[in-house]
Amino acid sequence: MTRLFDDPDDFAADSAAGFVAASARWVRPATGGVVRSTRGAEPTVAVVIGGGSGHYPAFSGLVGPGLAHGAVMGNLFASPSAHQVHAVATAAHEGRGVLLSYGNYAGDVLHFSQAQERLRTAGIDCRTVTVTDDISSAPPAERRNRRGIAGDLVVFKIAGAAAEEGLSLDEVERVAVLANERTRSLGVAFGGCTLPGAAEPLFTVPEGRMAVGLGIHGEPGIDEVDVPTATGLAELFVSSLLAEVPDGIDVAGARVVPILNGLGSVKYEELYVVYAAVDRLLAEAGIAVVSPEVGEFCTSFDMAGASLTLLWLDDELERLWHASCDTAAYRRGAVDGRIVVEGAAVSSEEEVAIGPATDASRRAATVVGRSLDAMASMLDAEADELGRIDRIAGDGDHGIGMQRGSRAAAAAAAKAVAAGGGARTALQHAGDAWADKGGGTSGAIWGEMLVALGAALGDDVDVDASAVGAGVARMKDAVMAFGKATVGDKTMIDAIVPFSDRLGTRLAAGDDLVTAWAEAAETATSAARATADLTARLGRARAHGDKSLGTPDPGAISFALITHTVHDILKGDD
Ligand code: ADP
Ligand code: MG
């Protein structure tokens, strides 16, 4: 349980402010996160890492010479937005290109990929290496889809050391890929974590039981067993990881770095009891253990659990692993010759200006504003239930993500409306705010939807029924192109497509907007409910497809609820 906070809503930002205040030796604040407070004599490739908050020392604690150049810090367990990634990467860039590296989660992939596109458009060479070390999150044949956990440290450290040696972006990318290919982890948990201000844990593990493969956001595990002895856990870790040795490696004689990671409330002495057995078991397998690590490298608040990571070295990786580095949470050897850089790195990116708009478009913008307000209230009331549905096969954050995102979107739209913005401007501001504050996959998707709908509606045309129908269809196309999901993947697309189609058909048949929208909202509701019969193929729920059978997709359910809320606003407006 997290006991110490002021306003729970501001927890991530307040904690980041304290971290910055305590860590000026390594970092300075930047829009969206932190960047190094020192630079070397020569410019290097910039390694930019990041993800949701709640995993310290991942990610901000790993910024400093020899490791990362910047960390993007999202809200609690929610990916940072593309805007944040872009701002940190721009501040960290030293003129030799950027390597983005982060754990492989759907929301992070969407936001970081969007930022990568924007960096490339701005002429900055940018590459990505996602970390996929968690062997429990997908079978070996689908290794590329696995989640990233404590193996983050390995990939970031190797990439950071390569950058520090002055290697090119091609080379830094190559060794980061190699490090990821040679890193495997398995995690277990005995109890879930409780987010600041929450009444209940985000997820739970039954008393006396241990969830094998439980993710760092509570993604369901692959097995549940009685809590073993420390040696029993070491045996499970080592035997599972030795069943997954990377190609081309002989176990006997291999050189391996073991990283035994505590997830929050398993303490150091406990970990050392487990490590004693890990060390013995690795030696029995003929493995040469090289500079092991025991401690906290990727946590999940107060989650009771641990993970073991094995990095299978070659000469190059061993050199880079041993290179000096100096960060708030991870240090090795001595780093000197640094030049101090003062001041915050604040993004110079302009806010989207409030352009001219016709009166008709301004009236439409007020409907947008009222709809978003009503959505935020509705989502406040539904957040617990949406979280519950997401917890069954996902990570339980869909309710809080939608709540935060819609609140921020409503506030941004209200500001744009007050400043005289039209429909496009109000939706653009709302969409950017949703992506920024909502985080996660749904934050990216809803941000994209609102911006696309706004682009279709414009600031200078009458927003009539057919414009709304066409706008919704454009929004649907944009979000499908963006998230690459199709009907049947068990995502919100399964509600959006029938909604858009039905709206289009009813409008074409001559219904007025309110009547057509009501019909389409009913269609969206039954389509969302019908996702219970599907197996997830995308997003966080993918790894646990069968677990989601019988439960509808949370994003589809929230979309359907929103269509009803908007209907109420449209009806009142009639
Ligand atoms: P996260 O998955 O990052 O935890 P949320 O829990 O807020 O984010 O949102 C999950 C929802 O996002 C899913 O229920 C699904 O409807 C939606 N989703 C996931 N992937 C996609 C995608 N590629 N396209 C459209 N919607 C998606
Ligand atoms: Mg989720």
Image: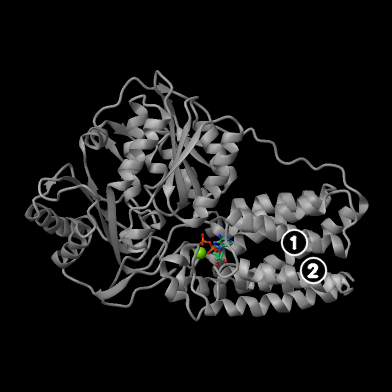
How far apart are the two marked residues, 2 and 1, measured between alpha carbons? 8 Å
The answer to which quarter of the image holds residue 501 is: bottom right
Q: Is residue 566 above or below residue 260?
A: below
Amino acid type for the residue under numbered disc 1: Ala
Quarter of the image that includes the C terminus: bottom right
Asked whether the viewer can see residue 7, the reply is no
Decide if residue 256 is on the left or right side of residue 35: left
In this view, the residue in front, 410 or 355, is 355
In this view, the residue in front, 496 or 554, is 496
Residue drawn 73% across and 75% down? 521
Q: Are marks 2 and 1 in contact (CB under 8 Å)?
A: yes
Residue drawn 27% across and 58% down? 307
What is the x, y in percent for residue 275? 16, 55
What is the x, y in percent for residue 358? 91, 49
Q: Residues within 10 Å of mark 1 (few under 14, many from 20)?
A: many
Decide if residue 88 is on the left or right side of residue 452: left
What is the x, y in percent for residue 515? 84, 76
